[in-house]
Image (tube, helix red, strand yellow):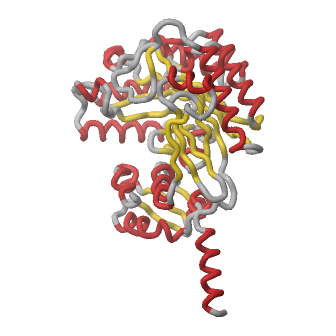
Amino acid sequence: MNPADYKSVARIVLKRVGELPAPPPLALYVHLPWCVRKCPYCDFNSHAVHGDLPEARYLDALARDLEGVLPSVWGREIGSIFIGGGTPSLFSAEGIDRLLQTARTLLRVSPLAEITLEANPGTFEVARFRAYRDAGVNRLSLGVQSFDAAHLRALGRIHDAREAIAAAETALTLFDEVNLDLMYALPAQTLDQARADLDQALALAPTHLSVYHLTLEPNTPFAAEPPPLPDDDVAADMQQQLEERLGAAGYNHYETSAFARPGHECRHNLNYWTFGDYLGIGAGAHAKLSTHDRIERTARLRHPRAYMDALAAGGDGHIASTRVLEPADRLFEFMMNALRLDAGFDISLFERRTGLPARAAEAGLAAAARRGLVERDQGRVRPTERGRRFLNDLLREFLP
């Protein structure tokens, strides 16, 4: 082979780096941004309702948003739909039905799709939630956070323990899949109080539990005026306690903050953590879409009124930002997601989802292994217990 031929082959190889052999699985996220009252710890794109909820106008905007992205996902199947917020259960059952009918009309939604609705126990009504189920919702996620009256007040929640228990008990009669959100390391919380919250959650026997360490996020009231929180040692004891208790109760700790009975893992979130694709519609929603040679992230305008006005005007003014992921970004973002999984990932998945060769991750993985943060076995990578405890330290090995 002469030198010119070598150069030609090199150009072909370089062109193929970054190309995906096939698009990954696709999900749909819908953001409904309103809530009754903004909680002091919350940094999500949520807005307290003032006056009437503009449900019909917002659903019109969601339909236009979805129509606009159809060319980029034509023919691809939607494996899950997640309706988050805010408090989506502020929307009427008729509104949720309209939303899901729009999705089924415009998209190829799998007949076996997991369809999750987030709900606040303070908005729970049996007839309404039965109607959500009839509209096609088959998984309910209840934002309980705590069963302790003092902690619920400190967190600014609109429900009490009695309402949380009643909502969970009723949800479990209506839906096969029910998740409860809990938080720990709450203001002035003791180890015994954290155990009591967990005991009550286990007594309800949901199929899934999401358990989060309270953090003080920037630009929140809690960040501006921090409440008294348990120290790091007590918080670590709380985490160890809940992991041991949930494991003994038959829940699989499959992701950093997620516990599920076998076979009841959240499929929508697993798609995020394995670097799948997702459409994101609604105010402030994010999306990740892949083609054969690029991975692109987009974000919508955050304020609901601006989002609705832009879509009513036509064009793409509702898109706040667009970013194409460079190879270094793909490496870091894949690891940021996949290393949250207790089972880790196969290096072949890394190659398929990023379009990068395994060697692109080698330096970071080797450094993490030397520090005892990951273990590797025949092409499989998983975080060690130390790696799970110090996830941020692990991820620093892959920063661009």
Q: Dividing the image into 4 quarters, which one contains the C terminus?
A: bottom left
Residue lying at 75% horizontally and 30% vertically, measured from the top left: 104
In the rendered image, residue 266, in percent from the top left (x then y), is placed at: 59, 38
Out of 84 and 76, give the one closest to the viewer: 76
Whether 31 is drawn above or below 69: the answer is above
Q: Quadrant of residue 271?
A: top right
Out of 47 and 96, give the one closest to the viewer: 47
Whether 235 is drawn above or below 37: the answer is below
In this view, the residue farthest toward the top is: 51
Whether 149 is drawn above or below 79: the answer is above
In the rendered image, residue 150, in percent from the top left (x then y), is placed at: 31, 15
The answer, for residue 84, to whether it is visible in the render is no
Residue lying at 29% horizontally and 30% vertically, measured from the top left: 191
Residue lying at 61% horizontally and 29% vertically, measured from the top left: 116
Q: Quadrant of residue 174?
A: top right
In the rendered image, residue 241, in percent from the top left (x then y), is placed at: 36, 38
The number of callouts visible is 0
Residue lying at 65% horizontally and 87% vertically, measured from the top left: 5
Out of 191 and 72, give the one closest to the viewer: 72
In the rendered image, residue 263, in percent from the top left (x then y), is placed at: 63, 41
Q: In the shown orientation, is residue 115 left or right of residue 274? A: right
